[in-house]
Structure formats: C-alpha cells, structure tokens
Amino acid sequence: MNNAIKRRHPLIRYARHCVTAAVCFSPLAAMATDYPLTVQDMDHQTVVISHEPKRIILQDGRDIMALALLDRADPFARVISWNNLIKKQDGQEWAVLKGKWPQAAAIPDMGFSDQGEVNTETVISSHPDLLIAQLRAKPALEQTGVLKRFRELHIPVLFLDYELHPIQDTVPSITLLGKVLNKESNAKAFTDFYTERLNRIESVVSKAPKKPLVFIEPIAGNSDNCCFTHGTNGWGGLVAAAGGINIGSELLKGASGFINPEKIIAMRPDWYLMTGSKRGAAGNPVLPFGYNTQITQIKASFDNLLKRTAVATIPAVSEGHVGGVYHHFYNHPWNIIGVEILAHWFYPQQFASLDPTADYHYIVTHFTQLPNDPVNLSYSPVSQ
C-alpha cells in the first residue's frame, strides 16, 4: 500500500506534536501567552521565546498567509524583512496584499532562498527577535552558517512545515505560531475549521474500496521537460489526503523529480492533474490560477498544456480525467482547500455538496481581514 496513504487520525497526529504543555490547548486553557515561553518547533527543537516577538523575519514570504490568520488587522505589522516569494510567484496575490496593506511594499526583501543565500549580517543588523523558517530550508540554512550565527546571537529560530508533511504538520504549525505570537484564540478558530473539514474527508476516503491512481504535474508548462512531480511531500501528501494514490510517491526517492512519460502511460493513471499560478509576463504557459484571473485564460492555457506530445497520449487525458489546481496549496497553511478540490474530483458522488471555493472565501471572511476578491482555484472539464 502507498506509504503516503498510511496516515494517522489528525487528532492523534496533533497530540503527538503537542509535546509540551506550552503548545497544547484544552477547552479550559487560557488563551493568552506567558513569556518567557519554551516550545518545541516542527523540527522537534526546543525554542525559548523571551518576549512577544515584534520584529520578525520570514525565510519564506508565503508564511504571510499564516500571519494573516493570526495578526488579522495587519499581518505585516511584525515583519521587518522577508523573502517575498509571493511577488515572484503569484503576482495576483501580491497585488491583493499590497492593495490592502501598502506598507508591505517597503519591507526589505532579503532573498533568504532555500539555498541559504542571504547576507546574514545585513539581516541581523535589522535587530530581529524571531526568524520563522520552513523546515525544508533547514539543511541549507545549516550549511551556510545562518543558523549558527542566529544561535550565537540568541535570536530564536522557529521552524514551521506545510510542505514536507503537509497534512501532519499544518495544524501543529499554526497552533505553535499562535502560541508564540500570543494569538492562540485566532489560531484555534482556524485549526478547528481545518480539522473538521479534514475529518469529513478522511471519514469518506478511509472507506473507499478502490483509490484512484493520480499523476500530478506541479507548475505544468514551467519546463520544456516532462514530467515533473512531487513525492510524498507537497502535492503528493495532498493527493494522498484526498484519497488518491500519487504516482510520484510510488516512484521517486526524493521530494520531487521527473518521471518518464512512457512510464506514466504504462501505469495508466485514473487522473492527470496540473498546477499553476499567474506569474511572469503575458504569454507564460503556466495555468494562471489565483486572484482576479479569467477562467477563459485558464481554459486556454489548460487546453494548450494538454496538447503537449508527452501528455496527449496519457490515457487519462484522452478520457477527460484531467484537472488543474492553484499551485501554492502545496506549501500553504490553507492547504485543506487543495485537499477538498482533489477529493471532489476523485469521489464526485460522495462529495457532491463540497464547495472548495466557498470554503476558501469562508476562511478569508471569518479568519482574516484580507479583501474577499474573486479567485479561481481550479478547473476541470469534468466539473464544468
């Protein structure tokens, strides 16, 4: 059986990560943080937070969507430096954020890539009191000496994770961050919603007699080569949570890689999926999902990508079992929406009433102060 499908119940996983009382909640627990605070992060490292952080660095700027759940009035209020991946990879979302909080454009973009490439002394000179980083970036941050320098200066580093183990680690990451930032009530409101939605899906897919075999191509069209995919992390984890068997999880030894089209054809997946977000100049072939995009443009890009020689002969494509989805759910605290989109496709009868886009807007209106702008998150001719 696919290892990605062997998942524990989310509440059991949650309890396993709550290894200190500081980051666990009970109905009677006080919703206020006392400092100094000692927690364990998603790297299982002990982190001491001496005071409420007010000067935060984001190694991955997409964590602003987690801060949007917590610091609702202004998710940028504590951010003094960041790696603005949103501007680089999802211009539409950046426009929405900048439109609501124009001061965000003045926050220094320090790069802070997954390769650890950053001017550490320049970052430190901004006097941060917390670095928030994604767990996938830890090896590079160690190799380049960034973590060592932060430890020497007693600047706490907090690792979160929505990508390496997206279903297992998202709720604990938001709970942890809410505690550290003294926003545990806001964190709990979102994680309760997340857990309820995930339990609903798991209750159905756990009983499925046969799970669909799925190939998913992240950022389809971004490379001339075919076919790039994720292993058990990222989209592989979301496919498994939605009740699918991810081909990449079966074949790849690492986090991601390319699989020969002939191998995909021979495996005869039940679904061929692609991800994308609006990025780059006009004419970029990647699926332009996201805020304030046009479904006609998405459909045109979708149809063109399916005409690629390596893709057109995959049986699922000729049978019409194809779909496209917003790329950034693979590393996003709102990844439950991506799971809902996939589950709705894989099990259309069981999830006929599921409306992932409505749930996305529910998150926006109930757990953030983001503008509730129109957004296109998925497309499939099957569901049109």
Image (cartoon, rainbow, N blue to C red):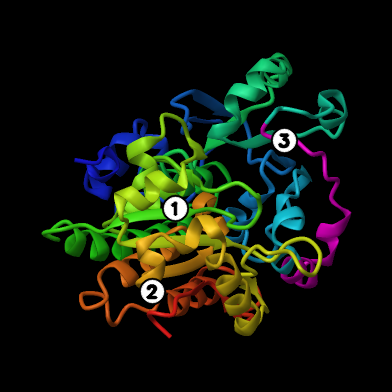
Q: Tell me the residue that label 3 is attached to.
A: 113
In the rendering, at what x and y percent does residue 335 appear? Answer: 46, 58
Q: Which mark is residue 320?
A: 2
How crowded pointer 2 is (Cα within 10 Å; few <14, some 14-19, many 20+) is rated as some
Name the amino acid type tagged 2.
Gly
Going from the N terminus, do you reach mark 2 or mark 1 first? 1
In the drawing, does residue 81 fall left or right of residue 246?
right
Q: Secondary structure at mark 1?
A: loop
Question: In the image, what residue type sits under mark 3?
Answer: Ser
Does label 3 or label 2 sit earlier along the sequence? Answer: 3
- Which residue corresponds to the image point at 25% horizontal and 45% vertical from the top-left? 5
The residue indicated by pointer 1 is 31
- Front disc: 3 or 2: 2
Give the x, y percent position of residue 95: 77, 69
Residue range highlighted in magenta: 95-114
Which comes sooner in the sequence, label 1 or label 3?
1
Q: Are marks 2 and 1 in contact (CB under 8 Å)?
A: no
